[in-house]
Amino acid sequence: MYRTNTCGELRISDVGKTVTLAGWVQRIRKMGGMSFIDLRDRYGITQLVVDDASSDAVKEALGKLGREAVIQAVGKVAERQSKNAKIDTGDIEIILSEINILNLSATPPFTIEDNSDGGEELRAKYRYLDLRRGPLKNALMLRHKLAHEVRNYLDAQGFMEIETPYLIKSTPEGARDFVVPSRMNPGEFYALPQSPQTFKQLLMVAGYDRYFQIVRCFRDEDLRADRQPEFTQIDCEMSFVEQEDVLNTFEGMMRTLFKNVVGVEIANPIPRISWYDAMDRYGSDKPDIRFGMEIHEISPLVQGHGFSVFDSVEYVGAIAVPGAAEYTRKQTDELTEWVKRPQVGAKGLVYIKLNPDGSIKSSVDKFYTPEQLQAVADAMGAKTGDLILVLCGEKRKTQTMLGVLRIEMGNRLGLRKPNEFAPLWVVDFPLLEWSEEDGRFYAMHHPFTAPKPEHMELFYSDRKEDLEKVCANAYDFVLNGTELGGGSIRIHQADVQQRMFQVLGISKEDADYKFGFIINAFKFGAPPHGGLAFGFDRVCALFGGQETIRDFIAFPKNNMGRDVMIDSPSRIDQVQMDELFLSSTAPEPKE
Amino acid sequence: MYRTNTCGELRISDVGKTVTLAGWVQRIRKMGGMSFIDLRDRYGITQLVVDDASSDAVKEALGKLGREAVIQAVGKVAERQSKNAKIDTGDIEIILSEINILNLSATPPFTIEDNSDGGEELRAKYRYLDLRRGPLKNALMLRHKLAHEVRNYLDAQGFMEIETPYLIKSTPEGARDFVVPSRMNPGEFYALPQSPQTFKQLLMVAGYDRYFQIVRCFRDEDLRADRQPEFTQIDCEMSFVEQEDVLNTFEGMMRTLFKNVVGVEIANPIPRISWYDAMDRYGSDKPDIRFGMEIHEISPLVQGHGFSVFDSVEYVGAIAVPGAAEYTRKQTDELTEWVKRPQVGAKGLVYIKLNPDGSIKSSVDKFYTPEQLQAVADAMGAKTGDLILVLCGEKRKTQTMLGVLRIEMGNRLGLRKPNEFAPLWVVDFPLLEWSEEDGRFYAMHHPFTAPKPEHMELFYSDRKEDLEKVCANAYDFVLNGTELGGGSIRIHQADVQQRMFQVLGISKEDADYKFGFIINAFKFGAPPHGGLAFGFDRVCALFGGQETIRDFIAFPKNNMGRDVMIDSPSRIDQVQMDELFLSSTAPEPKE
């Protein structure tokens, strides 16, 4: 062992001991005849001292050191003259008797400090140096701790971690698969799993009634910000359970994580809201409930008064922004422009100001009396000083726009506090989503989600309107406006599963080809079962108080799916291509 | 919840309670007016009783049940008349008041019993049914427990589990990579990792001084028996350590696993042997030390006596098989044929019998006096009753043959006891292996393994004989003749790494292209580091007392790399091929 102690370990009680530390030179300061080296490792920073009394060898070694050199340092622990309360080792320093240079370092391309001067691209290229910085180290330590706590909790609850294969079969339903050509089976491909969904259901058929896995998943999607082609799930499934059992089990898990990892007590029980209520009240299926500002339908109050914009639409809805009645014309104009941007897509914005002096002023005063506007305010529970913002159009679209506006106003007013954690279950999702574009239904969760038993008759109806009403025993876990996980009770009967494929317009041949093994498995005694999966990267980010996942992944890819550190993907040898029976039709690279 | 208790839970103290169980019908027996259902779940089997007093509804449901039906059963716990000491629930039975059929089952294609009547292929196709059998369930439970104990041990030792990417870069050194075409980067490919070797070394450069991961690895090799294209490793790396530290840490881990998982105390300390001694004494770099029968070189004793077969070779070696002197001519002839098979490859076999009557009889009596043969026996420590088996030829080749013969004789004599665990560290491996075929050196472990410091001068020599003598700080963990893991102290200095690539005949361009990022990383303060990896599938199998890993993997592939359950790999759509800029040169499939 190159060291007796770590750089985060020594305290005032260690004074007098001779110790050996090893680590990286964070910085060197010279003050008069003395030099101070901040030595860093994963555990902290310890101050080393070279002074006039030090040996020539030590002084000579000191002269060779630069930032990020790796050294082994031997010395005696002494009490510091000027203590540093900011670090755990701030009471002591080491009077050096020996420095062994283990490795020197070239000048790093950016500073290895909590706030680095390096740009994102440069830091990505030198990820191994970026990972030396405190914030990234803390992110990865949090991730380790979360994974460990998840495993301990689930193990204690009788769950077994079972590894499912990564080389599986391509099923081009949903997102694109990454595929892997098989050399031994010419012309054939494996696919990398988008999730272990079918395997975990097969494990239920096999009788493993409490399964989990922290597992990598792969999706070949065009990468939006903060999406990764490979990501990690906490994947779980249980048999002989109803929705209530699943929610209770994982509510317990999240409660344990919050308590043990970040020391926070979350709401008990975690509130639940139906998908329909979430859309009506928050314009989102993943509402941030850290603040109110709920959406209210005001159609009955504002329609039939001669304002054709409102009269011609399905739905008029509004939010009351607390204390914003004093917004200037310039500010309301800016808000109007904001909602008209393509990212939101509203045609216009109507406002009603509940002025502090009790008067009411709106952008539609021509059509409504103050009393009529007051009635709107009263119906919404808006108060003096509030600014009511109104959008109109198709119901769900308008609610969604109001939801986006609500989040924006929450941000502007500082209502989305990063150190507040407001979890929520969203339940009773519609089973199906109609795509006008494709003229077919898609599964809102996935094709294995069970319709609610009480909706079974609707599920077997041929009418689109009936099918749209079918609800699923599906649920999402939402935290602070982000969906962290979701799942459902699954179909466990072969005939219901076949009906589902029929509704989704998947032919029997296609279904047999793609899912034959699971349809078949369900014939041999499938138990009632259900489960869920959490996006582990996102869980880590939110627990870490961050919005982006990239810092919580040791070696992430960029938006083009590239790892710029190892310069991957890359061309492969013709020999490899030939062995795989492949030829490329890609344009030649420009050199 | 569909149940109040599991099928493995109820005891005599529960008599009188009304309970609800759920599970699979293992079998139904009728005896007079009574019917007994064995209900099975992951936790055990409970006997259910339907008798004359049962309701008509229960009797009717019973009539519909067959093997593997899934039911929910309500009833009262009663003491059994004839108890079954073989199962934990054998003291009680449930007098049924209600049966709810949750799912019926088609007739399974084989019996779901500890010893099934199904052939290997059929069971592979219906893996989800095979997994219901006791031995497989126990194998997966053992695997879960081992993984959990590994994580607890390493977490307690300050190791962080850090996930490394699965979509990396192809580096065609060593085994073949599986590759993944990139849609977003036309003509380019990711590779699936053969191990996270370079990433864990980069984590050491990044300062994460104790890393581990239970991680999937991929190798596109022609599959020998008991190899899988995807397999799992316990992958570990430490900084600021010497070989001794690594060995102690993982000796502790294995000791903990043996104690906590199978209740076995292994040797303390675990014995160590150099690679050279292992070859000389056991003819193997993974010796089974549960029995002796060591190899002895007898060249000096038998050469120069006019027996040209011995006189013309580099090496004559022998083992003494205890108690086998009474082998008949037929038996020794059979052994001679056995060693002449191509799998062993010996040209012939000489034997010396130390008969119980004190006489000596050999197949080379023409050339040696009894005294000369006795001298051989004495030198080997052979005893009256032993059969000495002698092979000759090139030294290492002959030792390897003797090693294979030793294992065979150990098997025949029942010396390889499955319930005995004899772990061993093999250390001091040669750094390099010369390939006559390719006329170049290969790294015996991998190109990042450090030469021993005291051999650094030899390492920089240009002479083949010098380079062959260079030893590495490399080590293997061997259990009962199987290599379970291995690792080394790594090169942490850029110039040593470049010399290694030079010795391996990897050009600077090639090295830069393939390993540029790690060579570069080493310039920025790489700490001394080392680690190892265990083959987790094999660890599970050996702890489970089995030789094959397949039962310890939930969904394994066959020898053609196929998953016959999901029928993968498979053809993919032309659309997918086009998106990936690929065309297939494989012959069209025969329909």
Image (cartoon, coloured by chain):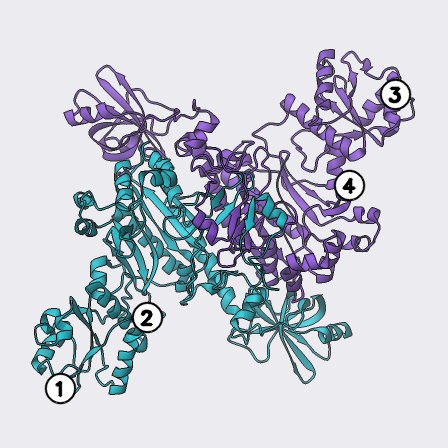
Chain colours: A purple, B cyan
Who comes first in sequence, dot 4 or dot 3? 3
Mark 2 vs mark 3, CA separation in Å: 96 Å
Q: Quadrant of residue A201?
A: bottom right
The residue type indicated by label 3 comes to Gln
Looking at the rendered structure, whether the residues under marks 4 and 3 are on a common chain is answered as yes
Cα gap from disc 4 to disc 3, whole angstroms: 38 Å
Residue B422 in view here: yes
Q: Three-letter amino acid code at disc 1?
A: Ser
Q: Is residue B203 visible in the rendered structure shown here?
A: no
Question: Is circle 2 on the same chain as circle 1?
Answer: yes
Q: Which residue was labeled with disc 4?
A: A436
Residue at coordinates 63% horizontally, 47% vertically from top-left? Answer: B575
Neighbourhood count class around disc 4 (C-alpha, 10 Å): few under 14, some 14–19, many 20 upward: few
From this view, report whether residue A48 is shown above or below residue B564: above
Residue kind at label 4, given as amino acid type: Glu
* Left or right: B541 in relation to B299: right
* Label 4: which secondary element: loop
Which one is closest to the eye, mark 3 or mark 1?
Answer: 1
Tell me which corner region of the image, top left, top right, bottom left or bottom right, holds residue A135. top left
Q: Is residue B265 left or right of residue B61?
A: left
Label drawn at residue B359: 1
User: What amino acid is at disc 2?
Assistant: Gln
